[in-house]
Image: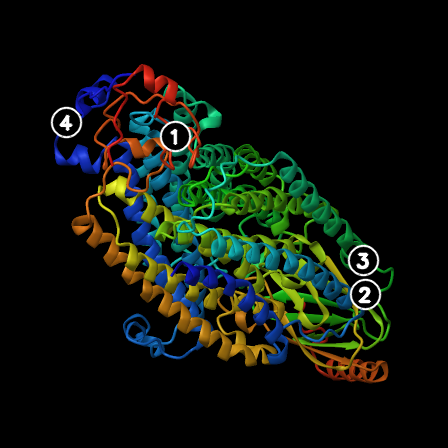
């Protein structure tokens, strides 16, 4: 194999990409997967901030119900003397969850990292369908606008919970914010669905069809495996949510009665039709939204695996069991949705079945944890910022995974269902798990995205504060839940039995405020490093993955040589070579002897 | 500095366990149970807590030990070049699988008792959730529900102590959830569906009835009060209510 230094533009053009140089097609309506990925990254991070502020609103009310909100209270709730009105509180937790799930976690994993990494990691010059890819980003914008509009409707935004359970969400009379706000909410979720669907067909096709020579399925990095399985999950589960969303819209606007029982009267107003079943919404919603939970964790698991192998300087322990676990989680993920409905009124016999399948889904997760620990065994660990975030993912995912077993056990779930125990559980999975994994991934792939490295010392400060504070916010939720402290109450202390829990909640809110404030360090580091960070070479971490052989940042068309893959991505400290890493494109020693002009690895 | 990070990760199991140990001293733990079935649920909770607690401490401590021991700067031995171990994978697949299956099977009896084996007794009362209150209906002197002499009420549920109780729970408008924390009873109520809960209170007193499913802006204030009292007091209270209601012109109060 000789050094191929193809002009990036010629290379791109040969693959059929338009590359007119104007600003609009390069940076706005771009069809380049890297630009689209970074667009997804920026919009998700902005929504991350909005979602975080909404969470602070929730925390404010739980700690000090009805006390005037400082600074912004006067502006927002002048009529109430700066207090958060109760319907506004229902909006806060509804929108916090909606924003974090649909606008942050799903787009930042699949949209930002999926887009940016898939072609680079498999050795393709772009996605299989670049235009579709562009559309998948631009379909997020109607969603952004719809959800944004929802905030300005009566009631200041949808407030039926992110689960939008019928009939509360269906009957316009059920709540002050069940008018246009809910319609816009449904439209926003539908547009996110379209965006994800366009992305997922693209990812599946790209991963199956466009791998570089030698890149067999079992030489793919776990990130790509996770993205692939996630795309499959999305493709099969999303249509159900989209259909359910339309059914709810029809119920609301045209007088159908999919989710309304016969003769329903809500707040003195009679439903236009009936004969439906409120539980049907829950089944349809969770048929998507349970697999969505795995859509929100699998890609993070994949990225964390890559970071751990790189900074442990060791091959990933049990690569194939890791792949099978991802597939197992995805497969089982389709038959566990009923565990959200143990006390919903669903046939209790069904609860038994869902309990067994739900218990079993803990198994592949356990196997993954053991394999991460196996990877660290006998390693040479480099405590870089991305590694710390990756390690915290493992540590926190253990908590989130184990606490899930409590809810999976149907009798125990009777008590802890809809208490802070479940709030603790999913925040350990989604914030302490996925969001920490994403932070790690940003620090890890930042050099590839922007050609510069983020500051490691400030990264560690950011990690330390976030890690400590998140545990102060979320860990006490376990014991609050064990006390029976219910979620979604605008004033939990209305109940005598929960009044003594207020000081603990105040402590948690202070920590939450500090945690959001600590993210300023990240924002400054992010933008500062983008412009002033030290220039990174191709491979600043001495990693094996194919993406590290491309220039940083890669030009249009990605590679300035034709990548040929010789091995899996985790051959660190291989006895075959002197260095402690062994890039996927580096020919084995005997081949190297034959072709002395082997491609130089610049870094 | 690297040892610092290892210790930070050690703090996770240490402070995690400490939270669970300290919680009960500040009444931030399972509330005292006053029912016969609640004990069963608490027992299952503790079984899972001990099992998961052992795994939690075990895995987190192993993580700490590896971080402490396998620092990049050590030069005692090279990094182990291994791709895994088939036998280890088998062990750590089968062991958790067996444990999880055990947990699942171990729960089934309790679930059946709580939600499937409805006692064959006449219902003590009917509870109907509506925005934002609990409407109650007791059988009157004829001992039958849904007759002319039914006794009705709002939010003040009285029940006799030491007897098997069967409640019909319903919703009139949106979803609610009938939650008695001290008895580990929870059941969502769904408009158009009739559900049952059954339990036996073991101690007299006044307790909260909590709505545990988001039901609108006033969800937080959908509070009921449960009064558990000896049979004689309960009968006297019910008779008083009946007299009060027949004295007024509107005999039922909440006919729809």
Per the image, label 4 sits on a secondary structure element best described as: loop
Q: In this image, B121 relative to A47: left or right?
A: right
Is residue A257 among the parts visible in the rendering?
no
Q: Kindly check if marks 3 and 2 are in contact, taking CB atoms under 8 A apart as contact.
A: no
Q: Is residue B227 above or below residue A472?
A: below
Q: Are marks 3 and 2 on the same chain?
A: yes
Q: In this image, A342 relative to A333: left or right?
A: right
Give the chain letter at badge 1: A
Q: Are marks 1 and 4 on the same chain?
A: yes
Choose mark 3 or mark 2, whichever is in front: 3
Q: Kindly check if marks 4 and 3 are in contact, taking CB atoms under 8 A apart as contact.
A: no
Percent coordinates x, y for residue B197 in the rendering: 75, 62
Q: Is residue A169 above or below residue A584?
A: below
Label 4: how many residues lie within 10 Å, few (<14), some (14-19) or many (20+)? Answer: few
Q: Are marks 1 and 3 on the same chain?
A: no
Give the chain letter at badge 2: B
Residue to which mark 2 is pinned: B123
Residue to which mark 4 is pinned: A20
Percent coordinates x, y for residue A569 in the rendering: 42, 32
Residue lying farthest to the front in this orientation? B76
Of label 3 and label 2, which has the lower sequence position? Answer: 3
Q: Gap in Å between the C-alphas at discs 1 and 4?
A: 43 Å
Q: Splitting the image into 4 quarters, where does residue A212 fall?
A: top left
Q: Kindly check if marks 1 and 3 are in contact, taking CB atoms under 8 A apart as contact.
A: no
Q: Gap in Å between the C-alphas at discs 4 and 3?
A: 70 Å
Residue to which mark 1 is pinned: A577
Residue A41 vs residue A160, the one in the foreground: A41
Percent coordinates x, y for residue B45 in the rendering: 70, 62
Q: In this image, B134 relative to B69: left or right?
A: right
Residue A93 vs residue A335, the one in the foreground: A335
């Amino acid at each position: 194999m000789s050094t191929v230094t193809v002009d990036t533009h010629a290379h791109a053009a040969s693959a059929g990409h338009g590359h007119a140089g104007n600003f609009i097609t390069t940076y706005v309506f771009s069809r380049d997967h890297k630009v689209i990925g970074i667009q997804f990254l920026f919009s998700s991070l902005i929504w991350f901030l909005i979602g975080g502020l909404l969470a602070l609103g929730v925390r404010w009310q739980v700690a000090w119900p009805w006390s005037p909100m400082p600074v912004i209270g006067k502006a927002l709730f002048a009529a109430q003397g700066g207090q958060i009105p109760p319907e506004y509180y229902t909006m806060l937790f509804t929108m916090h969850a909606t924003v974090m799930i649909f606008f942050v976690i799903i787009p930042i994993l699949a949209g930002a990292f999926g887009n940016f990494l898939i072609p680079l990691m498999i050795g393709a010059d772009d996605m299989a369908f670049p235009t579709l890819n562009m559309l998948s980003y631009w379909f997020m914008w109607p969603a952004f606008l719809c959800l944004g509009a929802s905030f300005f409707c009566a009631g200041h935004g949808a407030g039926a919970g992110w689960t939008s359970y019928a009939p509360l969400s269906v009957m316009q009379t059920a709540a002050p914010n069940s008018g246009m706000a809910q319609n816009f909410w449904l439209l926003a979720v539908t547009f996110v669905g379209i965006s994800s669907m366009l992305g997922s067909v693209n990812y599946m096709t790209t991963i199956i069809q466009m791998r570089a020579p030698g890149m067999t399925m079992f030489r793919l990095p776990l990130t790509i495996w996770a993205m692939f399985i996630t795309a499959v999950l999305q493709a099969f589960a999303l249509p159900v949510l989209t259909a359910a969303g339309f059914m709810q819209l029809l119920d609301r606007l045209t007088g159908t009665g999919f989710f309304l029982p016969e003769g329903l009267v809500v707040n003195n107003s009679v439903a236009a039709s009936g004969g439906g079943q409120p539980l049907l919404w829950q089944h349809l919603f969770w048929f998507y939204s349970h697999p969505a939970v795995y859509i929100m964790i699998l890609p993070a698991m994949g990225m964390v695996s890559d970071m751990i192998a790189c900074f442990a300087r060791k091959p990933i322990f049990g690569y194939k069991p890791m792949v099978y676990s991802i597939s197992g989680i995805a497969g089982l993920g389709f038959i566990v949705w009923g565990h959200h409905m143990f006390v919903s009124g669903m046939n209790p016999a069904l609860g038994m079945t869902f309990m067994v399948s739900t218990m079993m889904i803990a198994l592949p997760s356990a196997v993954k944890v053991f394999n991460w620990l196996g990877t660290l065994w006998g390693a040479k660990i480099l405590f870089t910022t991305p590694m710390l975030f990756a390690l915290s993912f493992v540590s926190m995912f253990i908590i989130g995974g184990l606490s899930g077993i409590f809810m999976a056990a149907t009798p125990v779930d009777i008590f802890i269902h809809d208490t802070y125990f479940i709030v603790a559980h999913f925040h350990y999975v989604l914030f302490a798990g996925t969001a920490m994994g994403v932070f790690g991934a940003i620090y890890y792939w930042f050099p590839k995205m922007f050609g510069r490295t983020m500051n490691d010392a400030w990264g560690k400060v950011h990690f330390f504060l976030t890690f400590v504070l998140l545990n102060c916010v979320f860990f006490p939720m376990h014991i609050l839940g064990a006390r029976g402290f219910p979620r979604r109450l605008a004033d939990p202390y209305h109940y005598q039995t929960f009044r003594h829990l207020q000081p603990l909640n105040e402590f948690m809110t202070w920590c939450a405020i500090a945690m959001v404030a600590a993210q300023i360090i990240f924002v400054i580091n992010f933008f500062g490093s983008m412009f002033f960070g030290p220039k990174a070479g191709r491979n600043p971490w001495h990693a094996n993955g194919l993406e590290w052989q491309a220039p940083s940042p890669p030009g249009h068309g990605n590679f300035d040589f034709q990548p040929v893959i010789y091995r899996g991505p985790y051959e660190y400290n291989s006895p075959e070579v002197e260095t402690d890493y062994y890039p996927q494109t580096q020919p084995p020693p005997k081949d190297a002897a034959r072709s002395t002009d082997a491609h130089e690895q610049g870094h | 500095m690297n040892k610092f990070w290892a210790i930070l990760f050690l703090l996770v199991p240490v402070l995690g366990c400490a939270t669970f140990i300290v919680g009960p001293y500040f009444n931030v733990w399972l509330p005292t149970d006053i029912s016969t079935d609640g004990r069963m649920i608490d027992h299952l909770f503790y079984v899972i807590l001990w099992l998961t607690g052992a795994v939690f401490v075990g895995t987190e401590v192993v993580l700490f030990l590896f971080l402490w021991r396998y620092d990049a700067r050590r030069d005692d031995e090279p990094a182990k070049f291994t791709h895994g171990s088939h036998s280890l994978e088998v062990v750590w697949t089968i062991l958790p699988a067996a444990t999880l299956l055990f947990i699942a099977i171990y729960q089934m009896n309790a679930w059946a008792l709580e939600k499937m084996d409805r006692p064959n007794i006449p219902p003590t009362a009917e509870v109907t959730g509506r925005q934002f209150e609990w409407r109650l209906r007791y059988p009157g002197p004829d001992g039958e529900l849904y007759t002319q002499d039914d006794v009705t009420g709002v939010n003040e549920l009285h029940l006799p102590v030491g007897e098997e109780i069967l409640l019909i729970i319903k919703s009139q408008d949106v979803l609610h959830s009938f939650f008695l924390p001290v008895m580990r009873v929870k059941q969502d109520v769904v408009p158009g569906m009739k559900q049952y809960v059954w339990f036996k209170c073991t101690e007299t007193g006044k307790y909260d009835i909590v709505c545990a499913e988001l039901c609108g802006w006033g969800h937080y204030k959908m509070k009921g009060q449960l009064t558990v009292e000896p049979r004689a007091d309960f009968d006297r209270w019910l008779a008083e209510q009946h007299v009060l209601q027949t004295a007024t012109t509107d005999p039922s109060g909440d006919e729809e």
